[in-house]
Image (cartoon, grey):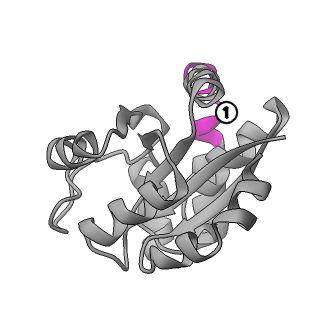
Amino acid sequence: MKTIFTIGYESTDIERFVKTLVAVGIDAIADVRAVPLSRKRGFSKNTLRERLAEVGIQYLPMQALGDPKPGREAAKAGDYETFRSVYGAHIDRPDVSLIVAELVEEARKMKVCLLCFERDPKTCHRMIVGERMEPYGYSMMHLYGDDPQRYVRNKDRLSAAAA
């Protein structure tokens, strides 16, 4: 099985975030935010793309995989059942399913990490994107950008899990 990585930037800063990606050996970030802008310094799409390029990580804009506004509002309100229902209906649309297939193709060529805001993948639509990749032979590994040294310390275990 191949691995698709996921990460949220909620509890980190751009430098620790990038160090985490480098420590894990990520080749590309698939930005699955519907609105790839952020009030958090360094995480709006253009600034993020430039910072990632400095360390050789490709930026893949995938706004079509973003959570529609009603899903985002349900998640903010803590209504995760509605959130999953809204996002599930969105990602299962034929045009969006094609984008998932494109993501799978990118992930076959390089080590890709799905990016969104939420630290906890269980409350983020990137978890559902990863679930839709499972039939293509992918499992998920969730990264946390607040302690890059965790991945440096556990490099051998990480390599074995991602193989």
Is 120 on the left-hand or right-hand side of 81?
left
**Tag 1: Cα neighbours inside 10 Å, few (<14), some, or many (≥20)?**
few
State the image quarter where residue 129 is shown. top right
**Image coords of residue 146 (percent x, y):** 41, 79
* Residue 51 seen in render: yes
At a point 60% along the width and 52% down the height, the residue shown is 5
Query: What residue is drawn where x is 83% and y is 35%?
Result: 137
On the image, numbered disc 1 is attached to which residue? 92
Q: Is residue 96 left or right of residue 158?
A: left
Say which of 4 and 34 sits in front: 4
> What's the magenta region?
89-97
Residue 125 in view here? no
Does 87 lie within the magenta span? no
Q: Looking at the picture, which amino acid does disc 1 mark? A: Asp
Using the image as rendered, state which of residue 7 and residue 93 is in the foreground: 7
Q: Quadrant of residue 42?
A: bottom left
